[in-house]
Image (cartoon, coloured by chain):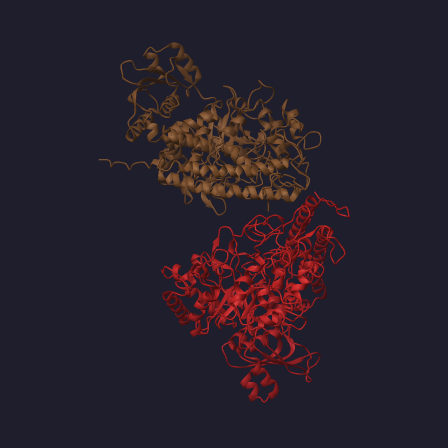
Chain colours: A brown, B red
Amino acid sequence: MTPTPAPVPWTDLAWLGEHAATHLPQQLRLRADGPLVATIDAEIDRLRSLADGAPGSLDLLDLPRARKAGMGATVLDELAAAGEEAYALHTERDADADGDAERLTVIGGGDRGLLYGFYAVVLGLAPTQSADWVVRSPQHSIRMLDHWDNMSVHPVTGQVERGYAGGSLFYEDGELREDLTRVAHYARLLASVGINRVAINNVNVHAREATLLTERLDSVVRLAELFRAQGITVLLSVSFASPIILGGLTTSDPHDETVQAWWRRAADVVYAAIPDFGGFVVKADSEGQPGPFAYGRDHADGANLLARALAPHSGEVFWRAFVYDHRQDWRDRSTDRARAAHDHFAPLDGQFDDNVVVQVKHGPMDFQTREAVSPVVGAMPATRLAVELQVTQEYTGQQKHLCYLAPWWSENLRFPFGERDAPTMAQIAAGSAERPGGLVAVSNVGDDEFWTGHPLAQSNLFALGRLAWDSDIDAGTILDEWIAATFGPAQTVADVLRELLADSWQLYESYTAPLGVGFMVRPGHHYGPDVDGYEYTPWGTYHFADRDGIGVDRTVATGTGYAGLYPEPWASVYESVDTCPDELLLFFHHVPYTHRLHSGKTVIQHIYDSRADGYEQVLQLRPRWQQLVGAVPDALHERVTTLLLEQERSAEEWRDQLRTYFHRASGIADETGRPTY
Amino acid sequence: MTPTPAPVPWTDLAWLGEHAATHLPQQLRLRADGPLVATIDAEIDRLRSLADGAPGSLDLLDLPRARKAGMGATVLDELAAAGEEAYALHTERDADADGDAERLTVIGGGDRGLLYGFYAVVLGLAPTQSADWVVRSPQHSIRMLDHWDNMSVHPVTGQVERGYAGGSLFYEDGELREDLTRVAHYARLLASVGINRVAINNVNVHAREATLLTERLDSVVRLAELFRAQGITVLLSVSFASPIILGGLTTSDPHDETVQAWWRRAADVVYAAIPDFGGFVVKADSEGQPGPFAYGRDHADGANLLARALAPHSGEVFWRAFVYDHRQDWRDRSTDRARAAHDHFAPLDGQFDDNVVVQVKHGPMDFQTREAVSPVVGAMPATRLAVELQVTQEYTGQQKHLCYLAPWWSENLRFPFGERDAPTMAQIAAGSAERPGGLVAVSNVGDDEFWTGHPLAQSNLFALGRLAWDSDIDAGTILDEWIAATFGPAQTVADVLRELLADSWQLYESYTAPLGVGFMVRPGHHYGPDVDGYEYTPWGTYHFADRDGIGVDRTVATGTGYAGLYPEPWASVYESVDTCPDELLLFFHHVPYTHRLHSGKTVIQHIYDSRADGYEQVLQLRPRWQQLVGAVPDALHERVTTLLLEQERSAEEWRDQLRTYFHRASGIADETGRPTY
């Protein structure tokens, strides 16, 4: 007799808990072959144990069986063309049953497609009452989460770099955890929103983690098994210096034959153990990581070196474009970190092998609350790209402040690189069938009880998956999906959560660094205000505030020329203070405090007002949340309450410090008479 | 056969190496009883092994034997009255010998006195050719070094808090080192300059170090043995919460009888193991350390609690007056950290038991490069005091910048608390025979090859000992003593070192925080410039710079009232911008940038000039040092060269950041046209 498994803690189920289980129709038929069928079977059992399902039925089939059953050839052809990750879905009223029972049919274009269709039903993402077949397929072929997890705990940065949700889910005491139960749950959560790749270690590869490629490969094998069960491919972050660190060679020069041979052998060994291994993620020549520059080679040389070792196994290289001089001289205003990725990578367009994906942060700086879009995205038409987003809230409140990021990601993803009908960031990232790209994001989970530290930050993980599936889904719609799947249909809960989260990113922006200037955070940990924190440092992140004005002149006419890296109309829009959007004004221009925004306010009064008003709005959050006592689990309610108190404290600090700093600098009184210090 | 001991590395000998050995006369006679006689014997053997001694003879006697030998009753009576740490010394030309041979006689007033007299001869501190007997006794009864060493390595602060010379000399891997050879050398170095007490662990007492009082007492026993051999008493830093942490009690309330009993028992156990144990050092109710405030008791209650446990064993409590609100609201300009120690302690004068020594930092802030003297020193006539200095260069260049601190300490120690003939800080600290006080200092040594990271920072350790012996010795004289003992008589070496070190503190001041305003360092580690680093923090260390002016108004008339805590004439001198010394102007006053100093320059031009001039002077150091290639050991030369390069880099950063910050703030151009950025 096998012992009854302990019930899964409700927190571990996130959006795949009781409320999701109620979406699963009571009558189920699963007719399919393939490696993920057992997964779907197990998920059904698990959900069944949590709640009674919905009235009605769900028929799950694979494509061959659907053909055999004589289903419509048109939809099946369409499905087959849409690929193995697609699914077709049909909903009809069940004439035989009472009430609102439905008969749902899901056909998988392939193994993963069937799984995604199943989860769509569970999460309530299936359209109800649609008379026709609907075929759904992901916009982005690459839908990847990067984990910045270390095996060891770093004395300063902790175990997960920029992690705000406890330690690593994967590692403990320097090794892979013995008990990987939560990783299995995590894989389910990711698959349910369509994630298909996970990189399992920090892009800053330290000595111990480097050995995942060699002596600790068995740890990768174990993780790959768990993720494989949910259709997710595993990738490794590797050090460009691996041939030296691990192989005992004296060089890692891409043109050196022994180096090339070393990488080929390393890849062979990995693929012998993990035939569906995804490939490598590489941060090279960035913030101290080794790279090809040491040998006078460029990033194409570097990326292609690894790509050629992986190619025989169909593996891919994700090569990060986050390359800049982090030892910049703050005295030198001609160097502009915002230009760096473009300057390094745009000239290499067309030189990367087919199995190289250049991974580009959505903005030119570093995941700021507000910054321009990265011009690199528009500058490499002959290169496979993946746009990198940051789910972990490094600069956006560190999972202490509410900050639902989907509206910000959407704004970036919808940005057209050119005139109105030009392809958007999302379209460029998606690429073509021949040269597919996608989205990559830095995960926000850890071994925290609520996965994400702030329980409501789960919404960002959910939204990332949804936007990677389809970047056109409205951020508000995604929020509603997440609320319903996680908290059920109760109206008050939905109302309060929508109020708290929907505009939380703009609220966060309102009391932190103003008008796109960025940073102003405490150096190192990046939490809390410090206007001059990075001003006189080598990091290239400056605001240039003085007694007269503030902002970075990135114009072509008088500044760093960065604005000219965009296609028209943007180059012109950004070049002029008259047309530059208010929210990016200080990103592109240095202006006097008395400069009048399109909003009608002066820059200084905007700084004063929005920080004070933002704080007042933050004070509205906790009373609203208080209304949910008893309506959400107590432990979750308490955690959020505690964090809202911290958000209030921190927002007040932001308000007072920024208002005071700029009053001291400008000498201009706040028109409203509110105090500075 | 015992194996020949390995030769001591020359670096371990510091000022007790070859050059010291040459001072030891060739003919020696040691006639004395007492526990330290064996020590002197061993030191003689060791020095003999290093170098041939000087021509002449040295006669070392204890007081009884001197009397028996019929030496002059007057001097012997004077010596007896001067106490057991005193010695009498007589030098005469040896008529029988050729050349400059001398006959030296040293009589110890007691055990330690004989040792100190011996070392005075070795270090060349004995007056030459004095016809008469000289009796020397220390000005300060307490001459103590505090070690901020932890047993474990702290992930952020390292093993030695504010240590810039590697790890702890004492501890390794969380325990006392097995091999304590270097500690024995260290004890010799300290005794040779008259140190008589050492506190062996950080005043911020962490969990592991707390157990030195109980389960790890054997470690204290071992250290006490080594230091005892050099006449040095060992003390422990203890946590005020020890009864809870170690004793399992629920309180550490000084009025609780179980708490009192716990401390008595703890003291009994310590003294059973270490009969000459010195006592406890306590940081209470300061920067998060536990203390009596939690129970509504004051610092006298807290200190007397421990004092009464120690009193039966003649132990002492060193109770630190470094108490302030480290969670101050930066918005609140009425709270003044500089007042804190005075506000907490002055009202308690007379309430401390006889075996309590209140340990007061020399300034009211925190070991700044420049700050006022602490008014506490003048405000507690009925309390035993020890003035605390910081040998480790936390705010004075962290043993990367040259900063010979004796001139700064002298300036403080000579400060008269009142009109011209009023007792100085040193005189007040020294106390009386009945209520002796003294000097305490935070050590700057670690397990670094050169003891102090910067080899020339050894001069500060040497000088601290000398000033604790006699606070009237001229800082330049001490520097000459240290140079000669450490590097020998070579004129070039002496000239260069004097040039590099003599004014190095004022040079450091010239390019760092201006005019007494203090801080402006990077938060946390305190190295390098960050003008606003502490401006919007809870630490109480502000400059209040805005577009118009800078400085802290501590006047009675319009400020925090701090200036009024001094006796006249100082209260009046500091109260007025007209009489306040330039170097403390911004410590006491908020003035416009255009305010004219006594020097004739405006504040802003002073800021511009001295930072630029200071940097230019720093550039003169390395060429000078270069002249000593071959004249000092190569490894030492290289280390200093490397550090001089860092000093140049850092001084340039200070120059450019401060000049730029204040140009941006003031808008006033540098008259000399030198650039800002």
- Please state, as top left, top right, bottom left or bottom right, where the N terminus of chain A lies in the image: top left
Can residue A401 be spotted in the picture? no
Can residue A520 be spotted in the picture? yes
Measuring from the top left, give residue B616's x and y in whole percent. 73, 52
In-image side of A311 versus A488 (left or right):
right
Residue at 49% over, 50% down: B155
Picture quadrant where residue A234 is located: top left
- Above or below for A256 versus B49: above
In-image side of A497 versus A289 (left or right):
left
- Above or below for A539 versus B361: above
In-image side of A321 versus B512 (left or right):
left
Query: Which residue is nearer to you in this view: A265 or B524?
Result: B524
- Above or below for B596 versus B300: above
Measuring from the top left, give residue A567's x and y in whole percent. 63, 23
- Above or below for A152 versus B127: above
Measuring from the top left, give residue A419's x and y in whole percent. 61, 19
**Figure disc tally:** 0
Picture quadrant where residue A512 is located: top right
In-image side of B546 versus B271 (left or right):
right
Measuring from the top left, give residue A158's x and y in whole percent. 47, 44
Query: Which residue is nearer to you in this view: B104 or A401?
Result: A401
Query: Which residue is nearer to you in this view: B90 or B109?
Result: B109
